[in-house]
Image (cartoon, grey):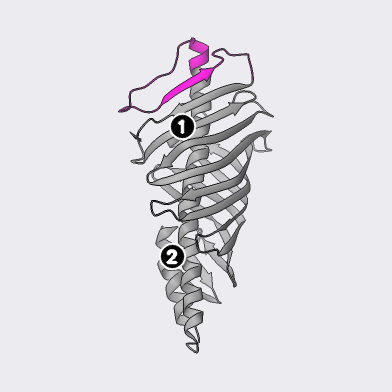
Amino acid sequence: MKKIIAPILAILLASCDGETVKNTIDTATAIDALTEYSTVNKVFQDVGNNSGDAVLSSEGTASSTAKLTATKAEGPVITIDPLDLTTFPKTITIDYGTGVLCKDDITRKGIVTIVSTNWYGVEGSVHTSTFTNYYHEDYKVEGTHIVENLGENTDGNLEYSVKITDGKITTATGATINYTEDSTRTWIAGNDTPLNIWDDEYLLDGIQNGTSSKGVDYTLTVEESLHFVLLPRSIEAGILDIDVADIEDIKLNYNTKMVTILGKNIPFGY
């Protein structure tokens, strides 16, 4: 989404009436909020991907009754308690230590703790993630991330509800960005390789809200399901509506690769 911010800024500034400097400042502040959103959204989407991967890996580990560990060069250390196939809830701890450079070139450090009521593929299972000094690159992550398996839809794809409460990202400079989410993820590809998240694709629907480090509120509503691919990370299709500060009805159309704002259209690259 960061690549889309510049054309939005160009349209907004070109659309200002020039009568007051305040309009430009407010516009720039709104753009700052959008830029921060693109960061916090990426971080929390990443949390969901990696937490699901850890639960799936834990199931394979429990079935072999071997403790899953890895060196820092290979990945985080994952522990499961209790280590069996039938006892729930389970506590799954993902420990990145002082830093692990992962396959997607993101360095993660600290601990993510997941409490699971059943395995990831079991309908009705709930997976609650919390964080202890956890960092995605230089961003400290806090909050509660809850995923529930809603079962298969009419197309035979698993659907998961995703709720994020008290989400907060703290930047290296100490700025804080608040975030909440109430969405549905539909797993449409990669479910036949459960131990490899990188070939996964999913659809995202729902609403995301937040407050920027400068106190600007924003709301994003998925008008048409966003189609996410993980490697390389991209949004292949879908339509997203954005309201930020007093600027409403910004529309990002990933089908046509067009952004619409204040009645004007401009192409974007992603």
* Residue 122 x %, y %: 64, 25
Q: Tell me if residue 190 can be seen.
A: no
Q: Is residue 188 found left or right of 149 in the rendered image? A: left
Which quadrant is home to the N terminus? bottom left
* Residue 73 x %, y %: 30, 28
User: Which structural element holds mark 1?
Assistant: strand
Residue bearing the label numbered 2? 5
Residue bearing the label numbered 1? 111
Q: Who comes first in sequence, dot 2 or dot 1?
A: 2
Q: Which residues are magenta?
A: 61-88
Q: Is residue 176 found left or right of 104 in the rendered image? A: right
Q: Residue at x 52, y 14 (%)?
A: 62
Extreme-bottom residue of the structure: 19
Residues 36 and 126: in front is: 36
User: Which structural element holds mark 2?
Assistant: helix
Q: Residue at x 56, y 77 (%)?
A: 263
Q: Residue at x 60, y 72 (%)?
A: 246
Residue type (three-letter) at the residue carrying disc 1:
Ile
Q: Which mark is residue 232?
A: none
Within 10 angstroms of label 2, few (less than 14), some, or many (20 or more) residues? some
Marks 2 and 1, Cα distance to the nearest angstrom?
32 Å
Q: Residue at x 49, y 32 (%)?
A: 112
Tell me if residue 127 is in the magenta stretch: no
* Residue 196 x %, y %: 44, 30
Which quadrant is home to the C terminus? bottom left
* Residue 61 x %, y %: 48, 16
Q: Which quarter of the picture shows residue 198? A: top left
Residues 101 and 11: in front is: 101
